[in-house]
Image (cartoon, rainbow, N blue to C red):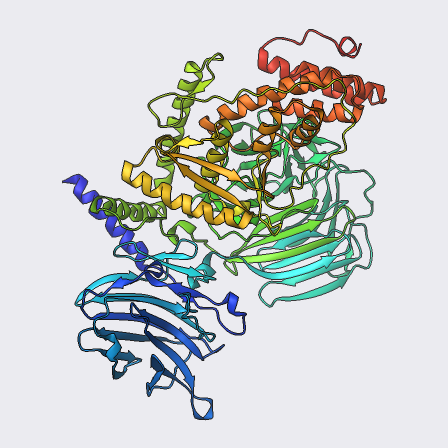
């Protein structure tokens, strides 16, 4: 009984959540855009809807926008290739009226179009009598259409008609929602056009898709960043924000100060009359609301300079002279003692883990504490809550040395500012869904929901929500899709309680100093994407699977409720830790097997035997054998896909599509036959029933084929139950190319192979048991090859250094790489750098093996 009541309670919560939707609908794009940009929406995935010789009633609500009140609203095509259209036409004095079109016949509806308000419409098709009844904004007409008699199926499209030979050039500018189809008295479809999954909206009754192109969803405005400011600068500016009035301050050293007012969207320019600006690099600027003061600072020299709006001068008298050590640090103001608290940063080839406490309003020395329990890093995010500093993520490495490959961190720490006690709250066990990212330089705390918001670089910029309990990232905005590829990137997230908005300032700069600053806004509190997104389902399900989808909706609603996610992720982490612990106990170096998560049996992973004969002499290499600017799938240096036009389309691969593509490539490389179907399902859909798993496999195979068509001539084959992938002429996968070269035996193969290997590690940020086995075997063979190459005398020092660095990526305590790198650096007069490389190696060696490295620097050099 209790269980039944719980289920009813959960359903009521979900129903309430769905009833609280904001404004929604499908915004149909039309003129003045190009035809190729028009929106189309084909109901039933463009397939025929069976009439079963009963009346079909199509109902919907529409909002007429004033942009282009002319052209098609919807088009119905019968199975005998006849058309029925609802359109807008022009009458006298430019008045607009709806018309019904059957074939070439026009039937006016005497009701002038009302714009910018929701209007109801419906059309009933009688296939026995050949009648059509249309009701538009309470005005009804009835039309005879003999060609309707006996029709057994109809196709329906709103906006631009995508059906072959039935497209029309003119499309009306309308928003559509609440589409319903009745067959007889029974409602069989209901597309609300609210929650969606990309270009697809599933109906609420049978989960049948309506499939669109160039879709623009009204509801997405609530989870979409809106650009409100953009400016180019000849030298990198510093940015600060006053949350009390919603004003941005943009300082270009001591010459100008720009004041951007977010409410009025206007910018004032103040010419600075004097004083010294303390900052010597971007983003050493902060606005302190408690003092209503704009303050520039310099951590290296402990300098501060406040701006005086009366005299329009900076109050500082000392100009900065030192190079700084705190690129991309995170800094917050602590009102408890009027101090600035900075953590991390980068400078002079080092990442740091220093907590720097400065006192701009007191004659108190700066304090510096090394938080040794947190790895050195830059580009992390922080916020103060009461007397606790929270620090999230960043990029760095345990040694703090830039030359030892850095990695992204996805962990959350708390620092008690009274005792300096550091606690690690959690760490994400694997690469986040959606791909790697770095956070902005500060977080926003939501006291009501007890969570943090941070802006991340994932998919070109997106807002995320985290909490102190569980290692998970909840998406709170749609991806911005920006190209965040500048040499220097600074991003800060701010909250204005006055405007009830979140703002993100994105500052991208070049080495020359030229920079672009863009500011975006988002409504607060943000809304989880999950509450808008429909599950990715497959049509044609059994009753049992329909119950499954019901529960998917329930889960979607529940995840909006605070606390449910916490319990899930806590249990999930415990299960992952248990499996990893079990895998470590069962793994044998001889067999190289590991336990796949959730599976009951151990999966044996074997790489193909790969050999390469060493040539007698290897020339100095100038690499120019490959072009990875288009038509490629890359594993080395990170998962990366570029289409035939040269566009980076990596972000289009969802986690499942990415895993499926990687799996097909790995197993095709192992055996040209590929992977047997049941094993593919076992690895990717082990948690689903057999029929459901097959349906998912087929759907994702179809999606993957569609994406690969954009990349080039890449085929997915299914032969005798085996799935494989084939890269045709003009397309390339660097991993498959490397395997091919490993089997070669000539100098030219070696030159090409080195060009590939020096691109970086294989899938460095992809962690999965069945993938790790392939990575380990490939890494072992790569280490053997590179170690043999280092012993050759005819390679240049530059190439040997590259080989040594690549070896360290595969084996960070490789002695061959250490000896060669230190010897060459000393020969080049870089003895200090050689000593740093050696010291870092010894530290990692001792930490990994529990014993000190037995050779001195002089011994390995000699």
> Is residue 562 in view from this perspective?
no
- In the image, residue 280 sits, relative to residue 811, either above or below, namely below
Q: Quadrant of the C terminus?
A: top right
Relative horizontal placement of residue 282, taking residue 768 as reference (left or right): right
All told, the count of numbered labels is 0
Q: Position of residue 689 (x, y in %)?
A: 28, 36
Relative horizontal placement of residue 318, taking residue 290 as reference (left or right): right
Q: Residue at x 82, y 47 (%)?
A: 317
In front of the other: 784 or 453: 784
Q: Quadrant of the N terminus?
A: top left
- Name the residue furthest bottom: 92
Q: Position of residue 403 (x, y in %)?
A: 70, 28
- In the image, residue 58 sits, relative to residue 668, either above or below, namely below
Q: Position of residue 809 (x, y in %)?
A: 63, 25
Q: Residue at x 30, y 59 (%)?
A: 19
In front of the other: 283 or 675: 675
Relative horizontal placement of residue 140, taking residue 519 as reference (left or right): left
> Is residue 314 in view from this perspective?
yes
Q: Residue at x 60, y 15 (%)?
A: 847
In front of the other: 684 or 66: 684
Question: Which quarter of the picture shows residue 525?
Answer: bottom left
Q: Residue at x 72, y 8 (%)?
A: 855
Question: Which quarter of the picture shows residue 88?
Answer: bottom left
Q: Position of residue 540 (x, y in %)?
A: 27, 50
In front of the other: 568 or 337: 568
Relative horizontal placement of residue 125, taking residue 526 as reference (left or right): left
- Name the residue furthest top: 854
Question: Which quarter of the picture shows residue 262?
Answer: bottom right
């Amino acid at each position: 009984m209790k269980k039944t009541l719980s289920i009813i309670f959960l359903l009521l919560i979900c129903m309430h959540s769905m009833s609280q939707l904001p404004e929604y609908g499908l915004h149909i794009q039309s003129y003045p855009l190009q035809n190729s940009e028009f929106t189309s929406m084909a109901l039933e995935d463009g397939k025929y809807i069976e009439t079963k010789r009963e009346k079909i009633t199509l109902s919907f609500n529409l909002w007429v926008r004033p942009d282009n009140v002319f052209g098609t609203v919807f088009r119905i095509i019968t199975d005998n290739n006849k058309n029925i259209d609802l359109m807008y036409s022009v009458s006298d004095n430019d008045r607009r009226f709806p018309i019904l079109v059957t074939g070439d016949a026009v039937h006016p509806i005497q009701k002038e179009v009302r714009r910018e308000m929701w209007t109801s419409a419906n059309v009933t098709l009688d296939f026995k009598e050949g009648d059509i009844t249309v009701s538009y904004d309470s005005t009804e007409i009835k039309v005879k259409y003999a060609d309707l008699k006996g029709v057994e199926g109809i196709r329906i499209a709103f906006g631009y008609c995508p059906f072959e030979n039935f497209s029309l050039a003119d499309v009306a500018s309308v928003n559509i929602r609440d589409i319903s189809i009745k067959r007889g008295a029974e409602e069989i479809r209901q597309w609300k056009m609210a929650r969606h999954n990309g270009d697809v909206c599933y109906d609420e009754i049978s989960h049948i898709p309506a499939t669109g192109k160039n879709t623009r969803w009204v509801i997405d405005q609530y989870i979409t960043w809106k650009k409100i400011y953009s400016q180019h600068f000849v030298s990198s500016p510093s940015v600060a924000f006053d949350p009390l009035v919603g004003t941005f301050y943009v300082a270009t050293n001591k010459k100008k100060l720009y004041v951007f007012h977010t409410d009025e969207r206007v910018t004032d320019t103040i010419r600075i009359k004097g004083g010294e600006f303390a900052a010597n690099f971007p983003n050493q600027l902060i606005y302190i609301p408690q003092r209503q003061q704009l303050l520039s600072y310099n951590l290296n020299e402990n300098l501060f300079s406040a701006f005086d709006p009366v005299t329009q001068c900076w109050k500082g008298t000392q100009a900065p002279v030192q190079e700084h050590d705190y690129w991309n640090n995170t800094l917050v103001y602590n009102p408890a003692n009027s101090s600035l608290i900075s953590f991390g940063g980068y400078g002079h080839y080092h990442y740091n883990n220093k907590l720097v406490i400065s006192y701009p309003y007191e004659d108190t020395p700066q304090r510096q504490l090394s938080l040794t329990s947190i790895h050195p890093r830059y580009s992390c995010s922080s916020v103060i809550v009461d007397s606790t500093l929270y620090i999230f993520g960043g990029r760095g490495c345990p040694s703090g040395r830039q030359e030892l490959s850095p990695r992204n961190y996805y962990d959350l720490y708390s620092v008690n500012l009274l005792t300096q006690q550091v606690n690690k709250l959690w760490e994400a066990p694997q690469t986040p869904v959606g791909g790697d990212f770095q956070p902005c330089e500060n977080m926003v705390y939501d006291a009501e929901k007890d969570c943090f918001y941070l802006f991340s670089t994932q998919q070109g910029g997106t807002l995320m929500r985290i909490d102190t309990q569980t290692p998970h990232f909840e998406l709170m905005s749609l991806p911005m899709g920006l190209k965040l590829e500048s040499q220097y990137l600074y991003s800060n997230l701010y909250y204005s309680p006055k405007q009830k908005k979140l703002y993100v300032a994105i500052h991208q700069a070049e080495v020359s100093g030229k920079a672009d600053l863009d500011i975006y806004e988002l409504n607060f509190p943000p809304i989880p994407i999950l509450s808008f997104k429909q599950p990715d389902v497959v049509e044609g399900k059994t009753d049992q699977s329909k119950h499954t989808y019901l529960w998917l909706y329930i889960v979607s609603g529940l995840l909006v409720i605070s606390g449910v996610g916490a319990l899930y992720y806590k249990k999930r982490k415990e299960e992952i830790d248990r499996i990893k612990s079990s895998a470590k106990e069962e793994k044998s170096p001889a067999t190289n097997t590991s336990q796949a998560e959730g599976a009951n049996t151990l999966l044996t992973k074997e790489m193909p035997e790969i050999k390469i004969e060493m040539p007698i002499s290897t020339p100095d290499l100038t690499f120019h054998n490959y072009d990875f600017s288009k038509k490629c799938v890359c594993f080395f240096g990170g998962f990366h896909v570029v289409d035939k036009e040269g566009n980076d389309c990596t972000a289009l691969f969802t986690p499942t599509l990415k895993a499926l593509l990687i799996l097909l490539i790995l197993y095709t490389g192992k055996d040209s036959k590929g992977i047997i179907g049941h094993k593919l399902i076992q690895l990717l859909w082990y948690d689903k029933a057999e029929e459901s798993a097959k349906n998912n496999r087929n759907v994702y195979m179809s999606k993957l084929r569609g994406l690969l068509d954009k990349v080039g001539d890449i085929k997915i084959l299914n032969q005798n139950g085996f799935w494989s992938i084939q890269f045709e002429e003009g397309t390339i996968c660097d991993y498959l190319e490397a395997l091919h070269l490993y089997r070669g035996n000539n100098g030219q193969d070696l030159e090409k192979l080195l060009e590939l290997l020096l691109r970086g590690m294989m899938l460095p940020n992809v962690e999965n048991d069945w993938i790790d086995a392939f990575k380990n075997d490939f890494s072992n063979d790569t280490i053997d090859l590179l170690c043999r190459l280092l012993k050759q005398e005819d390679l240049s020092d530059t190439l040997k250094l590259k080989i040594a660095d690549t070896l360290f990526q595969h084996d960070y305590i490789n002695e061959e790489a250490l000896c060669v790198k230190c010897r060459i650096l000393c020969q080049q007069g870089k003895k200090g750098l050689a000593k740093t490389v050696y010291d870092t190696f010894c530290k990692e060696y001792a930490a990994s093996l529990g014993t000190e490295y037995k050779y001195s620097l002089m011994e390995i050099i000699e």
